[in-house]
Amino acid sequence: MWVVLCGSWPWTECPFLQSHTRLHGGERGCDPDGHADAVRGDRFVMPAERCLPLSCVLDVLEGQAQPLGALYLQKQCSNLPGERPQLLFGLEPHVPWASEALGKLPDAVNFWLAEAAAGTSRRCQGNTKDHYENLYCVVSEEKHLLLHPPSDRPFIPYELYTPATYQLTTEGSFKMVDEEAMEKVSWIPRNPSAPDLAWCPCYRLLLHSAAGEMPYLAALWFHHVQQSHGCIAGKELPWSPENFRYGMEYDLKHSYCQLLYYLTEARASTDRALGSITKDSSWK
């Protein structure tokens, strides 16, 4: 893991974003407490979607509107060129040195923006991994990544959860609605920022990145993400990075991770068959 300086960006001021996005609508994620795609009891709950101009989110950030839950824009579908082309002025469509090193252009370029719910100071998402080489250009505020290498897979348990989605009620509250047509979701339930070391005795890396820095997150690394909110020029600003996602190579490291996955699953299956799923039967 490493961080490089990525220079200054025009997006660090809300007036710039306001002037370039006021008439552009789109879907915004919304949930009660700022936890996107998270386990709630025996449910894996996804955010509600609200069709709002980006300027409405910026009004909340500037204290000009009252939020209803936590709003954020956090898509993985190359939404910067696809939905926000007006923000591409003066920006590279890729990271030239990274494209040269990896021998390819990014599969997706994402723009993420988030605000904090009232009474909270951080947004976070659960522990996860993906099949992309990720470069995060942190535009404002800070990004914190808590990392586990792929070799920690035997100590990181997955469980199956019924998928559900938050929906906004007419009273302005949130309710969970099961997604009955969807299959169960395999997810990591434990919070790595407060681990049970007796159950999960693995080493963690913590990476802090400030505005103007670009952390690199290697494919298949487990990561838990948090974003802080600070005050710049007297205004409460969003965490808003640009994310370049390069597809990984399915080479020896992927084969190793697959082998480790199936060995871990075989051990867990054997433990279940013997009725010995307890903390004492965890991998040591």
Image (cartoon, rainbow, N blue to C red):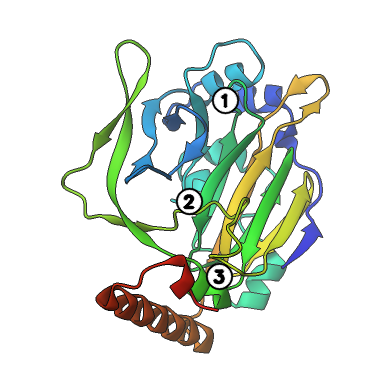
The amino acid beneath tag 1 is Ala
- Residue bearing mark 3: 219
- Separation of marks 2 and 1 at Cα, in angstroms: 26 Å
Count how many numbered circles sit on residues in the image: 3
On the image, numbered disc 1 is attached to which residue? 117
Is 49 placed left or right of 82 in the picture? left
Inspect this view and state whether residue 139 appears.
no
**Closer to viewer: mark 3 or mark 1:** 1
Work out whether residue 157 or residue 223 is closer to the camera in this orientation and state it: 157
Asked which quadrant contains residue 262, the reply is bottom left
Seen from the viewer's position, the closer of residues 71 and 162 is: 162
Residue name at image x 62 percent, y 70 percent = 202
Res 29 visible: yes
Task: Rate crowding at label 1 as few (under 14), some (14 to 19) or many (20 or more) other CA atoms within 10 Å.
Answer: some
Q: Residue at x 73, y 43 (%)?
A: 142
User: What's under tag 2, amino acid-wise?
Assistant: Ser
Closest to the camera, between mark 3 and mark 2, is 3
In the picture of the structure, the residue carrying the numbered disc 2 is 78
Depth order, front residue of 194/111: 194
Label 2 residue SS: loop
For the residues labelled 3 and 2, say whether their Cβ atoms are less than 8 Å apart.
Answer: no
Q: CA distance from mark 3 to mark 1?
A: 30 Å
Question: Quick one: quadrant of the N terminus?
Answer: bottom right
